[in-house]
Image (cartoon, rainbow, N blue to C red):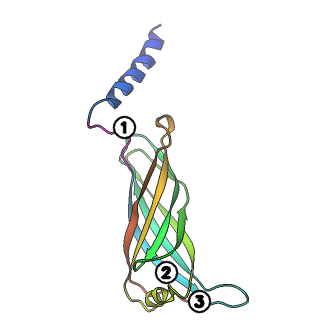
Amino acid sequence: MKRLLLPAFAVLAATLSACVPGQPLLQVPTFQVDGARLTSITLPGGGRPATATLTIALRVQNPNPLPLRVANIGGAVTLDGEDVGHVDFPNIALPARGEARQQAVVTLPITFANAGVFLRVARGQQVAYRVDGTFTVDAGPLGRPTFGPYTLVQGVLQEPAILP
C-alpha cells in the first residue's frame, strides 16, 4: 500500500503545482543565431533554375526542468524584407535546462524579384534576414504544444558568399 501512495502523492503534487497562478507549466524554448551565411549561388542552366544556398546555425535553449524534443520547426525566410523561401530545421533534442546546437541548410530559388538581394549578399554587403515560423514541442506527458507564429531568428548576413 505504501508503494502506491508515493506515486499517487507525486502525481497530485505535480497537478496542484500546475494550478499555481503565474507559474507556466511549460516555458517556451528560446532560439539564438550562431551564424548565418550564404554558401553558394548556382546559375541557371541545363533546365535548372538559379538557386542560393543559405546555412543557418541555431542555438536552442530549454529553460524547463525536463528534457524536450523540439519538432516541426519551420518558417519563412526573409532577406531585406523580401520573402525568399522556406526553411525546415530537423528535430532537436534538448536536455533539461540545457541547450543544443543545430544547423539547417536551405536552398532558396533566385527569381527576378529577389536577385538583387542575393547579389548584395554575394558582394559582402549587409543584408538583414529573418525567419518567421512555428515549432512544436514534444513534452512527453505534458503533450505537444505548438508555439508561434513569431520571429524565430533574425540577424544580418555580412560576409561574402563562397562561390563555386
What is the distance, in whole Å, between disc 2 and disc 3 at their CAs? 12 Å
Q: Which of marks 2 and 1 is nearer the N terminus?
A: 1
**Label 3 crowding class (10 Å Cα cut-off): few <14, some 14-19, many 20+?**
few
Q: Furthest residue to the front?
A: 113
- Residue drawn at (26%, 33%), measured in percent from left and top? 21
**Label 2 crowding class (10 Å Cα cut-off): few <14, some 14-19, many 20+?**
many
- Residue drawn at (53%, 67%), measured in percent from left and top? 87
Question: Which one is in front, 148 or 61?
Answer: 148
Element on which disc 1 rests: loop
- Residue drawn at (39%, 18%), measured in percent from left and top? 9
Which residue position holds label 3?
164
Element on which disc 2 rests: strand
Element on which disc 3 rests: loop
Q: In the image, what residue type sits under mark 2?
A: Leu
Q: In the image, what residue type sits under mark 3?
A: Pro
**Is 44 placed left or right of 151 in the picture?**
right
The magenta-colored residue range is 22-28
Q: Look at discs 2 and 1 and give the one toward the viewer.
A: 1
Q: Look at discs 3 and 1 and give the one toward the viewer.
A: 1
Q: Earlier in the sequence, mark 2 or mark 3?
A: 2
Which residue position holds label 2?
38
What is the distance, in whole Å, between disc 3 and disc 1 at their CAs? 49 Å
- Work out whether 60 lies above or below 155: above
- Work out whether 90 lies above or below 14: below
**Is 90 placed left or right of 63 in the picture?**
right
Check if residue 24 falls in the magenta segment.
yes
Count how many numbered circles sit on residues in the image: 3
